[in-house]
Each structure stands twice: as C-alpha cells, then as structure tokens.
Image (cartoon, rainbow, N blue to C red):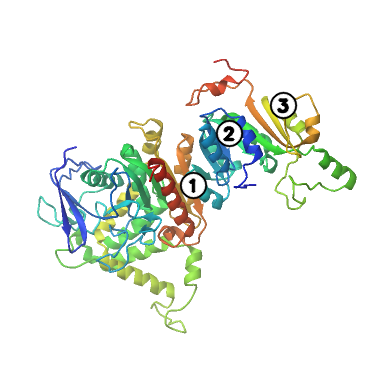
Amino acid sequence: MNNKLSIRKDWTLIESLIDANSKVLDIGCGEGGLMAQLEKNIQAKTNGIEVSANLTQKAIAQGFNVVQGNAEKDLNQYSNKSFDYVILSQTLQAMIRPKEMLLELLRIGGKAIVSFPNFGHWTIRLQLLLLGKMPVTKGLPYAWYETPNIHFFTIKDFQNLCQKSNIIIEKGLALTSGGKQVEISSGLSGANLFTNEAIFLLSYKNFEPIKTELKQKSFVGSSAIIS
Amino acid sequence: MNLNFNIVENSELECSIAEFTNTNCKLDSGFQLNNFKIAYKTFGTLNDNKNNAILICHALTGDQYVTGKNPLTKKNGWWSRMVGPNKPIDTNQYFVICSNVLGGCSGTTGPKEINQISQKIYGAEFPSITIKDIVKVQNFLIESLSIKKLFAVIGGSMGAMQALQWTIDFPEKINNIVHIAGALKHSAQNIAFHEVGRQAIMNDVNWNKGSYIKKNIIPERGLAVARMIAHITYLSDNSMHRKFGRKLQSRDIISFGFDADFQIESYLRYQGRSFVDRFDANSYLYLTRAMDYFDIEKSFSNSIEFPNITNSHINYLVISFTSDWLFPTSENKEVVKKLNYFNRNVSFTEIETDKGHDSFLLDELELDLTIDGFLKSNFKKINPHE
C-alpha cells in the first residue's frame, strides 16, 4: 500500500478535495507519504496516526507528527472539529464498526475523506456469480480466510449508509480498473459497476458551528452553514 | 534577568561549575536558595546562530557525565551510546549540555555540599526540592551560558519529568522535547517503592538523621538495599528470567543458607554495593521525594489550554517501552492524549523490548533511529541551509 516511489493516484485525488492551508489528520498514515505530499503541494498542516510501530518510527524520523495508535481505540484523544479534514484511506472495510468510524471521523473533522475498494465492481460480481467463490482481485488480493477486510460493501451500500446517518456526500470520485477518474453522482449506477476504488468527501448535515481554531472557510462548502 | 555568577573549571570533577550568588531563587517549598552552584559538562560547539543547544536531563541517579569518561567511576558516561560524535545525539552537530540536578551529589548544590550561610554540610537541613526547582536552577545555567532558546530538552524517567516541566515553565526557551519513559505524575506504586527505599536508608543506624558525613560514616547498608529494590523496578520479569533464570552463583548446589545462592541475588548485591561508592544517601532521599511530588496533570493541561506564554511551536516526541512497568505506556500516552486533544505537534511511539524501564539506557536500535531522525528533521526546519 505504501509505495514510496510512485505518487499514488488516489493521493492525487484526495489532494484535489482539500483546500490549501488546511489542518489534516491522516488515519493510517504509514510512514507519511500522503502527509508529505499535502504539506508540500497545498501547505497543509498534518498530523497522523499509525498502528505499526515501525512505520510510525519512520514517519517520526522524517519529521512528521505521527502518533502510534489504533484507529478504533485511539481517536477519542482528538477533540471535536479539531481538524479541517480527516482522511481514512483504504481501511473502512477493515474496521470492526465502520458506521461508528464514519461518525467519529466527522466528529473530529469538519470534513472527512474516505476511500475504499468497491465490492460492486463487475468483475467481483461475476466471480461470485460464475465461480461461486469469494472474489479475489488486484485491489482485494486476499483469500477469505486471511483477509483483513472484514466488511465488504459497494458504492451503493455506502451511499445508503450516508443517507441514513445524515452524512452529506459532497463529492465522490471513482478510479476505474483502467486508471480512469470519474465523478460519482448519486443517480447513476454505472459507477458502482466500473469503480475499483471510490473516494468520498463527506460532511455532516446540520452540524453545529463549534468555534475552534478551525478556519472559517472549511465550513463554507457545506450546505447547512452560511458564513 | 540580572545574574551574579562565576564559572570555574573543577579539575577534580573534570567539569565546569557555575556558581551563583545573591540570585533570587525561591523554591517550591518557600525556601530562598540564593547561593548555589551547578556542575555541568558540555560537548560539541555552540553554532553562530546559537540554535543547536540540547539540554539533556539525567535520571534519578545520573550525573553530568552523559558521555565521555566519568572521572569518578572511571567508566563511560551513562548515555555514551546515544550521545557523542556521529551518535544519534550528534555532538558534531549539536552543543550538548548536561548538568547535575539540584539536590544531586556530583558537584551541584545538594545535601552533601556546604551551606554557604552556616558553613556546615547541609545534610537533612537541605531544603525539600521539586522537579520544578530542578528546572528552575537549570534555567539559570542556560541563562548564564547566554543561550536564548534551546533546540531541544531530552530526558528519560526523572529526566522526562524535567523535560515536561520545561514546556510548562519556559516554553519560549525550547523548540523540541524528547520525553522517554515518563509520566504526568508519579504513581502510587512508584511512590511506594521509593518509600521502601527511603525507609531502608533512614533505618540504617549510620544515617544519624542525615548527619553522617561529619562522623565519617555512611548508611551504606540502607542505601544498598534501596538501590537493590529500585533496580528490580528498572528491569522486567522476562529480562531477569532471560539473564539469570534460576542459575546458581559460583556453586553447583544450593547452600541451605542465606548466601547469595542465585545469580540474581549476587547481581543485586553487587548493584547495591557499587552504588554506595558513587551516590549520597541524602541525595537519594531528596531526589526520590522530588519525583514523588511530581504531578503536573493540571498545570500541564492549563499550560496548553490557557497558555501565559505561547507554546504551540513546541514539537513533542514521547517514547515508551512495552515492558516498562514503572512508567508504562499507558502513562506516557496520557501526555500524548493531552497534546493531541489540543492539536499539538506531538509524536509518539512504543518500542517493543523486554528490557523494562532501563531500556532507554540500553541498546535499542529503534530508539536511536527515532531520536536521530526526529532531531535531524526538526533541526533542518530551523536551519534549512545547513
């Protein structure tokens, strides 16, 4: 996952969703590749949390503010709306309680950016349909008995959950298997068939404008608040 | 600040001594300590910008001899593996200062030194001191060296307590801290162990209510027992098992007596005996007490939430060890949580090792790499062209 040499495509997409000079928390930040990119390109002020001691130490040694910890246990140390953006990249499907995680992201951040592999991709659907076996793909390379991914869901599932939980999808971006980027709109189901990896920018409906050091402009994009 | 001081080189102690006179230094207890001296060593050179100075705070029984030869024990300094040319705390790059703490016994004003006013050895007349007092006195030293801002304050154990205290009392004078195996407050269990050690010393007939030096005796049995107890708390069950197990000492069969049959007994006795030669019993009482009194939970929170002087520029690195039960990971994490709650520049890692609290002094590659990288990358931020 942490390929240092190539600039990851999903990172570029994540970067495009973030306003310059924002405060960003990267959950599962590895050795800090995305943080480095955001600091360099859009002057973000970053913090990270990473479960692996080894990767944490590498990130610290490069001068990043990274705390070793478990996303499912240690997010309670961050205060409400203390970041403009909270990023959870490629890990929602590995969480024990994905819904609580989403709510937690939006408690800490004004906005959340979540990316996940789409289980609705047509190749996956075909594998299950034709072979009758749990799908194994490039994006989801593990056999069922050793996969860290314990919750499989599709783009449609995710959209439904957001709707139920009063979460606004401000923007959805899709990476297809061919490497093409498409915007995901709520009406079309084509995206659910062809998307390998989906990236969503989320915010809360009607969240209260709690006064912190947050920059006002991070509220502006939201439908509920008029600055 | 108007300072009356005089720096002299002490050839016997092979270190510098800063002597302060008529300094307005009020201790936590209310005692006015206006004349005092600080024994310290420096390594490396202060750069032209005066921004490469690192203060290293020693632990309970440490001293100013952080690296190089210790002239008193004839051994290498207590952190020579970490500090020196091309070491993680690189003295080719940084100007390292290490001073003996207030209340210590290797040259700084403490219970075994002479009270300038009464011209007698302090002994138990020495005022009670706290970690805050220790840091206050360190600050006088930094002032006397004309250093406006330290690049970093680094310490493990009691040294970590001092590093945190620096962020509360003099945030404008530091850029970074490295806090290794410490806590926001000394736990009940830790106070308990200290109390047993102090009782061992005070119940030694030689202790004489603290005035043993003029009688030319020392409470060596009590002090040795105190050290033996403390030493156990610095190790871990696993490391003791790995190192000693139930192995017998210089014998094949048990003696059916109370000799040091087991290697671990012999090892602890040796630790106790050799400690007596290098450490003052009263210092041990005063410094363990200073650690017991340490509780900055409130003042630390307040200093971040309602700072009198801005401190949001400080980068904090907190490190703990999996097998440390004296200052466990959970207590180190309390420091991290407070900082994260207020969105500070904090980093934290827990290093996997079975060597217990003493790990910070031992060969731990991850510790070296983390500290080395943390210092280098943050040094680059303030010296982009070096």
Parent chain of label 2: A
Of pointers 2 and 1, the one earlier in the residue sequence: 1
- Give the image location of residue B335, x and y in percent: 44, 43
Task: Tell me the quarter of the picture where residue A203 sits.
Answer: top right
Q: Residues within 10 Å of mark 2 (few under 14, many from 20)?
A: many
Label of residue A62 in the image: 1
Residue with the mark numbered 2? A86
- Give the image location of residue B53, x and y in percent: 31, 48
Horizontal side, residue B148 vs residue B154: left or right = left
Horizontal side, residue A7 vs residue A147: left or right = left
Label of residue A164 in the image: 3
Label of residue B351 in the image: none
- Amino acid type assigned to the residue bearing label 2 in the image: Val
Which of discs 1 and 3 lies nearer the camera? The answer is: 1
Q: What element does badge 2 sit on?
A: strand
Q: Is residue A78 above or below residue B139?
A: above
Furthest residue in direction top, as rendered: A226
